[in-house]
Image (spheres, coloured by chain):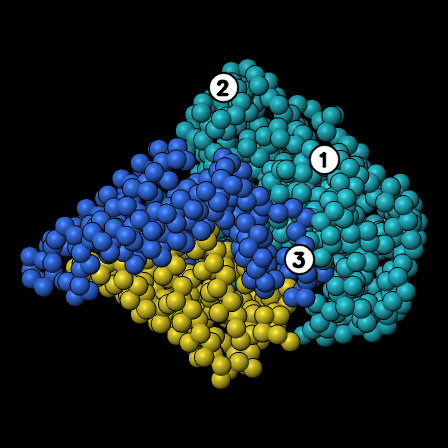
Chain colours: A cyan, B yellow, C blue
Amino acid sequence: MIRFVKATYTYPFQEKPAVRGVDLHVRPGELVLVTGESGCGKSTLLRLANGLCPQYFGGTLEGDVFVGGKSTEEMPLKDMSRMVGTLFQDPEQQFFALEVEDELAFVHEWRGTPAAETRRKIAEASKEFLLEDLLGHSIHELSEGQKQKVGLASIFSQEPGALVLDEPTANLDPESTVELACRLGRLKKSGMAILVVDHRLYWLEDVADRVAVMREGVIVAQGAFDMLHDGSLRSAYGLRASHVEDVRSTLPESAPPTKSPCAGEKGLRVDGLRFAYKGQDPLYDRASFWLGQGVTALIGGNGTGKTTLARLITGLNKAQEGAFRINGILFPASEMLRHVGIVLQNSDHQLHMRTVAQEIDVCLALAERLRGWSKSRRSREEQRRSLLRLFDLEHLADRHPQSLSGGEKQRLVIACAFAKKPSILILDEPTSGLDGGNMKRIAKALSLLAEQGACVLVITHDLELLQASCGAAIRLPLNGH
Amino acid sequence: MSLLSQWSARELVVIGIFAAVSKVTTLLVALAGGGMNPLSLMGKNLVFTTLLIVMLCKVSRPGTLTLFTVINSIVSMLLMGASVTLLPPLLAGALLGELAMWPGRNSAGLWPKVAAAAVFDAVTKALSLGVSYLLTRENAGMMIMVVPFVLIGYMGSLGGLYTGVHAVKELRHAGIIRQ
Amino acid sequence: MQVSSASRFLGMGGSVAPDSGYDARARMVISLLASAVTIIISSVEGQLVLLGASLFYALSIRRFKALAIVYLFVAFMMGLATLCTWGLSSVAPFVSFTFKGLAVPFMRGLVMLNVVLPLALTCRIQDLLTALKGLRLPFCIYLPGAVMIRFIPTFMNDIKQISEALQIRGYTLTLGGMFRHPLLVLRLLFTPLLFRSLRTSEELGIAAELKGLDAQSRFVPYRSPVWSRKDTFLVVAALTVVAAALACHYLLGRVPAAGHM
């Protein structure tokens, strides 16, 4: 169904090809997983399969890419879109409508499909993807897993012969990830050719027919999923684990050293926390918890209020009641942000300057002002260098922050948070979309910060990060809830 | 190819996104500043002109400014209740802006777009004074109060020409807009 | 006068507004009609008819608190304008300070406010999208229009997140700071939004191509917005009010000369 024959592709304004001499065949009823470290060319491979390269991005293609026996260069994108469905990491960015039903109808309406036919397609797709109860919902109300289902249902309703997915699990929790794997298994059985590009590997162990590992635009290894169990291969190509243990239920509960607050205790103690969104039942009602030194995971299902808790700790959301103590000292919620660092999910919103180096410098200067430190210019430069080194950003120091890849931006915003030297640091999904090498780099940096005495709270769906760095857990809902 | 089918779907999306972001930012700057204070008046015009220049660089095609204006006006008028009287000045500004851009229509350079934005701002501001006269024609005193506000807004637009050039240069540095 | 539906947009997703009971297109027609007629009519009598009917229309949505707040704000602005005009008329005799000269422009503003509020406060964003679809506009106008409405809530949320990111970094934006470092403030607030909008347009542009959309696309709605008898009644009532206002204007009102200054 999808066939690459000695495909070499170069983007416009680039000298080096992004993909070189690729031979790959995805047959109907087959699922092929393509993986490799960031920037290895796997997303370009996907863009070649759906015709975006070269038709949308321009550039030059040597060799051939065929879909359903036809060359992708000779077929208009409009026709290609009927043969290959594409799902991206953030499906919401692909939605044109605000309600689920309208989104499912959108493409058919603009293809001139008769109304009755569109209604039938919506009914079939929503039944297949269990979306019947969500048809009238706003897309903003959906969880990431539900958004992905809407994206898939929309593609399914167009009845393409092939499906390509770009990092589909980056924003999903482990349960939704398993559900997606089952669903892809069913689509595969129905005869669809599926090409998945992802850093996370374990979830496709029972579904993938073949795996291709890429490096610098070339497929360096290809074979059955079992080849990923070879640790030396994974470490050579910066891959994630092929099998992951779920430690969410086995991590010890984060417990305070003493029952009541005392002077000299090291950590964050929150008592009597009460918070409810306007017009809703309380999310937290007289809840208490302890965050000690080390790396602690915040664990809970969708809608249990993990991000809300992080926002309450920093004062971004105002708690209706609650006592916040850092190292035994009581602080008003409005003061918390001076002592607590937080890295939110969307890194695009957190980068302002012209270069990566400037971005770090500004954060160091702000931290100095906030804490009343006075440092020499030399010491600031030294600090900047060490942060860039820690997050492997040295070679990008002069680049514009907004021109970095998603993973590089993520590392930069974490480096900026480290610049503040916070005694408490909260990170919301710090490793989504990162390859194995960079995931380990973040895990190492967090452990390093914890060794220096900081309390680190991690909100994550990434089972590998949990396993690699977390020593304790706070589980939601909290007691007293 | 008919006039209305010259834009590709991706170009239409860019126009829609920029119409949304310009609406949101100008609305919020106005709300944050209480609507009538000089700083927010300048700020919202500055942001609008900056976005206009970036959009014209992203969708470099004759007619884009007019289409953007039509979209903005339709949505503002039909969905947010903006007065229908604003349409003629905006359309006149857009058409004259297109005219200013016409000699450089085939160039990927920045300056034809800046010229278009400058003409658009100047014409719409001048004609908006005429609209204000229509609305307050029973009392000339009010008109005297309108003029400084329009002038302050226009100063923001002039600032927007500078920041627009600056923004496009930065976007080129970041590799997001290609020369 | 542009009364934005900021409250609705800030509510994200637009699911906060109750069902208006009227098709959004009917409310749009009224808004358009009012904005045109209120300019034509320059007599107090004609404006009074428009004001009374539009106030009744605004009160019918039963959002008394919102209406009161907006009216208070407008009253404040009008008070300010009256004071300035009085001040000007005392130093510049050619500026008139008459009841009619002040009342008509103010009434124009209030009429627009009364017709826009029901549109802004009762229609959900999804209703507006459906209404836009119902207007059967050409593809090159519908697509950007729909994208614009679809992304206004998203960008509202983005701006909130950008300002939170600044707070987290430790920036404190003060009015003085804005005067001293306007370019820095602009960079901090605006740069992330600019890049974000470019990225969104790139991603959505790709999505549009992958959905096979182009200018030749033929649109067939799978469900049409319902125009009920109630909507027709509303528009007919509005036309009657317009006729009555015009009649009052020409029969009862004295049309002030344009040069009445």
Question: Residue shown at 64%/64% (left/top)?
Answer: B9
Do circles 1 and 3 both sit on a common chain? Answer: no
Q: The residue marked by circle 1 belongs to what chain?
A: A
Question: Residue shown at 55%/44% (left/top)?
Answer: C227
- Contact check, label 1 and label 2, Cβ < 8 Å: no
- Residue B13 can be seen, yes or no: no
Question: Residue shown at 85%/69% (left/top)?
Answer: A71
Q: Is residue B147 left or right of residue C144?
A: left
Task: Judge by depth and name the residue closer to the eye, A440 or B64.
Answer: B64
Q: Which residue is mark 2?
A: A272
Q: Secondary structure at mark 1?
A: helix
Q: Which residue is mark 1?
A: A132
Which residue type does callout 3 highlight? Phe
Rounded to the nearest angstrom, the CA distance separating label 1 from label 3 is 25 Å
Q: Residues within 10 Å of mark 2 (few under 14, many from 20)?
A: some
Which residue type does callout 2 highlight? Gly
Q: Determine which quarter of the picture holds residue B156.
A: bottom left
Task: Judge by depth and name the residue closer to the eye, A139 or A354.
Answer: A139
- Residue B84 can be seen, yes or no: yes
Q: Which residue is mark 3?
A: C219
Task: Judge by depth and name the residue closer to the eye, C163 or B25.
Answer: B25
Q: Determine which quarter of the picture holds residue C187.
A: bottom left
Quadrant containing the C terminus of chain C is bottom left
How many labels were placed on the picture? 3
Question: Residue shown at 54%/57% (left/top)?
Answer: C145
Rounded to the nearest angstrom, the CA distance separating label 1 from label 2 is 40 Å
Rounded to the nearest angstrom, the CA distance separating label 3 from label 2 is 56 Å
Which residue type does callout 1 highlight? Glu
Q: The residue marked by circle 2 belongs to what chain?
A: A
Q: Is residue B143 left or right of residue A122?
A: left
Q: Secondary structure at mark 3?
A: loop
